[in-house]
Image (cartoon, rainbow, N blue to C red):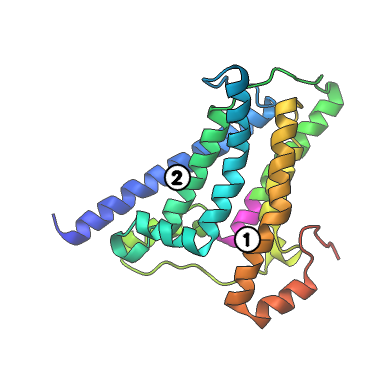
Amino acid sequence: MSQRTRERALALTLGLLCHGMFLAAVSSMAFSLSAGLQLWSGPFGGTTAVVVDVLLIMQFPLLHSWMLSRSGRAALRALAPWCAGRFATTTYATLASLQLLVAFWLWTPSGVVWPRAEGALFAMHVTLFVGAWLFLVKALYDAGLSLQTGAAGWTAVWSGREVRYGGMPTLGLFARCRQPIYLGFALVLWTAPCWSLDWLLLTVAWSSYCAVGPRFKERRWLALYGERFAAYRRSVPYMIPRFR
């Protein structure tokens, strides 16, 4: 088997793993939130379960932020040294999906669930939940769906070219606010149709990250794009979309 054939086989394998885990993570998040995080029962009990749940909440924002840092990006390239680190985007998406899977599959429910809305009010909650997911998908699309889902890395190796990162996103939802992906993620959390103590703790913690985390991302964008991003930042609001 030639080197080129091995590279393409590895690219396809990692691509299938990445997208499979991405779909599993999205599905697990959607079903878990719709059930108030009461869908699965983690393997722990008592005080250990509480500690593990807190760690599951913390691991996503902390590791997610680290993977986007300079040292984190270097580590992602080191994890996939083949083909000059072009698998880094695929590795990032795979690990981010793994973080969500770990959070929802190992979660131990508290059992504290508040009464669910009925009738038209419940239908409105479900509609808002679906709408939040559609908003998040649109934000991912506007940011470059290939890059956001990890396809940019493995398809570049498969095609024998460099990774196409694209430019600074400014169109679509990015013309309305600078961080529509984080806004969409927070909306998905807050519009969940089942309310529980578990849902509230997770939502408050991860929404706080959605509000603060992009500040560090914007520092990198300012260093990368300079005055172009500075002008964009002056004219487009941070999180609350403008509609005019």
What is the residue that sits farthest to the bottom in this orientation? 227
Quick one: quadrant of the C terminus?
A: bottom right
What is the residue that sits farthest to the left in this orientation? 1
What element does badge 1 sit on? Answer: helix
Q: Which residues are magenta?
A: 137-145
Asked if the residues shown at circle 1 and circle 2 are in contact, with their CB atoms under 8 angstroms apart, the answer is: no
149 relative to 232 in the view: left or right: left
In the rendered image, residue 99 lying in the magenta stretch gets the answer no
Among the 4 quarters of the image, the one containing residue 113:
top right
Categorize mark 1 by other alpha carbons within 10 Å: few (<14), some (14-19), many (20+). Answer: some
The image shows residue 132, relative to residue 7, as above or below, that is above
Amino acid at pointer 1: Asp
What element does badge 2 sit on? Answer: helix
Residue 11 in picture, x, y percent from top left: 32, 53
In space, the residues marked 1 and 2 are separated at their CA atoms by: 19 Å
Q: Earlier in the sequence, mark 1 or mark 2?
A: 2
Residue 168 in picture, x, y percent from top left: 60, 71
The image shows residue 90, relative to residue 217, as above or below, that is above
Q: Is residue 146 visible?
A: yes
> To which residue does mark 2 refer?
19
In depth, the one of 63 and 26 nearer the eye is: 63
Q: Residue at x 51, y 20 (%)?
A: 43
Q: Which mark is residue 50?
A: none
Q: Residue at x 57, y 19 (%)?
A: 41
Residue 222 in picture, x, y percent from top left: 64, 74
In the rendered image, residue 144 lying in the magenta stretch gets the answer yes
Amino acid at pointer 2: His
> To which residue does mark 1 refer?
142
Q: Residue at x 51, y 55 (%)?
A: 67
132 relative to 39 in the view: left or right: right
Categorize mark 2 by other alpha carbons within 10 Å: few (<14), some (14-19), many (20+). Answer: some
